[in-house]
Amino acid sequence: MTRHFLELSDAGGDALAAMIGDAIERKAWRKDVPKGAPDGDAPLAGRVLAMVFEKNSTRTRVSFDMAMRQLGGSAIVLDAGTTQLGRGETIADTARVLSRMADAIMIRTDDHAKIEEMAAHASVPVINGLTDRSHPCQIVADLQTVVEHGKALPGLELAWLGDGNNVLNSIVEAAGLLKFNVRIAVPEGYDSDPAYIERARALGARITVTRDPREAASGADVVVTDTWVSMGQQGAEARIAAMTPYQVNAELMQQTRADALFLHCLPAHRGEEVTDAVIDGPRSVVWDEAENRIHAQKSVLRWVFGQL
Ligand code: CP
Ligand code: NVA
């Protein structure tokens, strides 16, 4: 059966843990190897990934391209606006054609239903490079970063501040799969999808929702935030006003454990969801997190090709 990676739960907890472990091992192996040189075993030699972008991207685009190079394969980038998709060719027909021409498809789009449609009509693996609903690839990198910085995932206390968005949905999903706890502090009206929370709780994760950012941060092992205005969202002014009390700043970081980490998927809006002092400060691991997109995406690719 074709392995799609639309959500972390498509892989499940064991495979997600295996991806994190594989990413850490492969990263360590190629410590002094030039970035574009293939890994010794080149496990995806000859494979081509087609990447479709209906939204902007820096990290996802570069990390998947680099991931394919390091795995011995290659990637093709399609900006939707310059493809026939942008002129109305259907997702289904695009899926059928790309399946004949490439070995896997990565797509970044808006409506999550589009990626499900792509997977339904593709005969090769489809990977979610972010939708309005979720961003699973990011979370593999985030969890790799947390583990590399010496924190065990089971029982971890992760605080999320700001907007109840796509990145948070995938964090909550991961919490259920790997048994860590999430304290969500978001303003009223900006809550995340309750279905993710219910599923994670059913799997044994403790997910708490509060309007008090200090309460969420109190004793946390990891603090995570993201932009207050995601791609495609309207009403920036109202969002920023509502979320201003949820800014991750030095005072907020004083509530956490002394060794707490700060994560942000980037791009950051300095002075909004996070201050310079925090993102450039000693607890911030955001550049490791960004680099880890390459290593984590390699594991996702190996998983969809049945190698993990
Ligand atoms: N974090 C992330 O997905 O970044 P890009 O939007 O640059 O791909
Ligand atoms: N929540 C952000 C993540 C960007 C990587 C967005 O969807 O724009």
Image (spheres, helix red, strand yellow):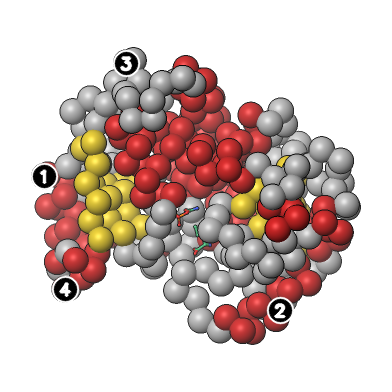
Q: Residues within 10 Å of mark 4 (few under 14, many from 20)?
A: few
Q: Amino acid at mark 3?
A: Asp
Q: Which of the 4 image quadrants contains residue 181? A: top right
Q: Which residue is mark 4?
A: 87
User: Contact (CB < 8 A) between labels 2 and 1?
Assistant: no
- The numbered mark, 1 or 4, whose residue comes first in the sequence reads 4
How far is disc 2 from disc 4 in space, using C-alphas?
37 Å
**Which residue type carries mark 4?**
Arg
**Mark 1 — residue?**
100
Distance (Cα) linking label 2 and label 1: 47 Å
Q: Marks 3/2: CA distance?
A: 50 Å
Q: Which numbered disc, 3 or 4, marks the residue that appears first in the sequence?
A: 3
Q: Earlier in the sequence, mark 1 or mark 3?
A: 3
Are circles 2 and 4 on residues that touch, CB within 8 Å? Answer: no
Q: Report x, y in % for residue 210.
A: 79, 64
Compared with 193, 203 (above or below) is: above
Query: Distance from label 1 to label 4 (Cα)?
Result: 21 Å
Asked which secondary structure carries label 3, the reply is loop
- Measure the C-alpha gap from mark 1 to mark 3: 26 Å
Residue found at x 75% / y 42%? 282
Q: Is residue 160 visible?
A: no
Residue at 70 percent across and 45 percent down: it is 284
Give the numbered dot on residue 41. Answer: 3
Q: Earlier in the sequence, mark 3 or mark 2?
A: 3
User: How far separated are the C-alphas under marks 3 and 4?
Assistant: 41 Å
Which comes sooner in the sequence, label 2 or label 1?
A: 1
Q: Position of residue 298 (x, y in %)?
A: 40, 33
Give the structural element (helix, strand or loop) at label 1.
Answer: helix
